[in-house]
Image: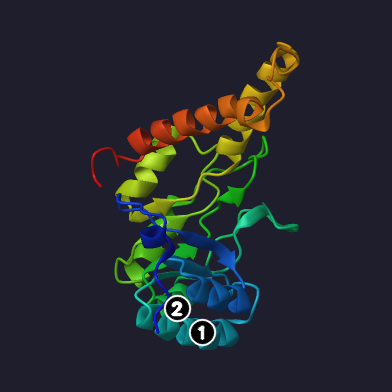
Amino acid sequence: AMVKAMDESLGITVPVALHLDHGTYEGAKACVAAGFTSIMFDGSHYDIDENVAKTTELVALAHDHGLSIEAEVGSIGGEEDGVIGMGEVADPAECAKIAALGIDFLAAGIGNIHGKYPANWQGLNFEALDKIHNATDNIPLVLHGGTGIPADMIRKAISLGVSKINVNTECQLSFADATRKYIEAGKDLQGKGFDPRKLLAPGAEAIKATVREKIELFGSANKA
């Protein structure tokens, strides 16, 4: 029997995805079973043949359960779960191989990195993006490491085929900043201000504000 998707069981009515980011092969399978609505299998650390084999299997599993699936070619730079890479550029031929497997989205490095961008970052490689987009039959592309990329570069990337942008560090920084201000103002020492629901509320609101900004920047407002 098919597991009831988690968004349904939580009574969510707006079109959102509960998405696994950078999933392992086993992790992707577990999330399908748990009722996620979307998975990403990151086989970028395998050689291309093994990435193809595992992605092929997970595409069938995801689509059998009505999930969308994202795959990755080449590593995304920066630090993600302890692995550090330097803003790599994916090979368009390898991208084409993975895109042809029936995935819904493709994550491919175009000089983007996770976390904070270093001062000497070269910027996004739009020539590479164009080549990858052409080689993959205009499949929706995913830009990881969206934090710290200038707004004009983000808009240009969207115009060249990027359909999903991952922003996480910026949300975490907003949260930390608002939480720091609350504690530095001594609000946790007033009344029941130490209650986690009160202590963490300004951070949660700050994340919402950051997400609203991103929805505007990405051109997603009122598109649901």
Mark 2 = which residue?
A: 98
Which residue does the numbered mark 1 point to in the structure image?
A: 52
Residue at the image position 43 percent from the left and 66 percent from the top? 38
Q: Taking 24 as reference, is 52 above or below it?
A: below
Across and down, in percent, residue 86 comes to 67, 54
* Count of labels in the image: 2
| Residue drawn 62% across the image and 23% down it | 178
Residue at (33% x, 56% y) in the render: 161
Given residues 218 and 134, the one toward you in this image is: 218
Give the distance between the C-alpha atoms of the residues marked 1 and 2, in whole angstroms. Answer: 6 Å
56 vs 147: above or below: below
The amino acid type, in three-letter code, at marker 1 is Val
Residue at point 48%, 31% (across, down): 210
Task: Report the quarter where the N terminus lies.
Answer: bottom left
Give SS at disc 2.
Answer: helix
Lower position in the chain sequence, tag 1 or tag 2: 1
| Image quadrant assignment for residue 21 | bottom right
- The one nearer the camera, 160 or 107, is 107
Q: In this image, 215 relative to 179: left or right?
A: left
Q: Secondary structure at mark 1?
A: helix
- Outermost residue, front direction? 191
For the residues labelled 1 and 2, say whether their Cβ atoms are less than 8 Å apart: yes
| Residue density around tag 1, few if under 14, some if 14–19, many if 20 or more, within 10 Å | many
Q: Position of residue 98 (x, y in %)?
A: 45, 78
Q: Amino acid at mark 2?
A: Ile
Q: Nearer the viewer, residue 113 or 212?
A: 212
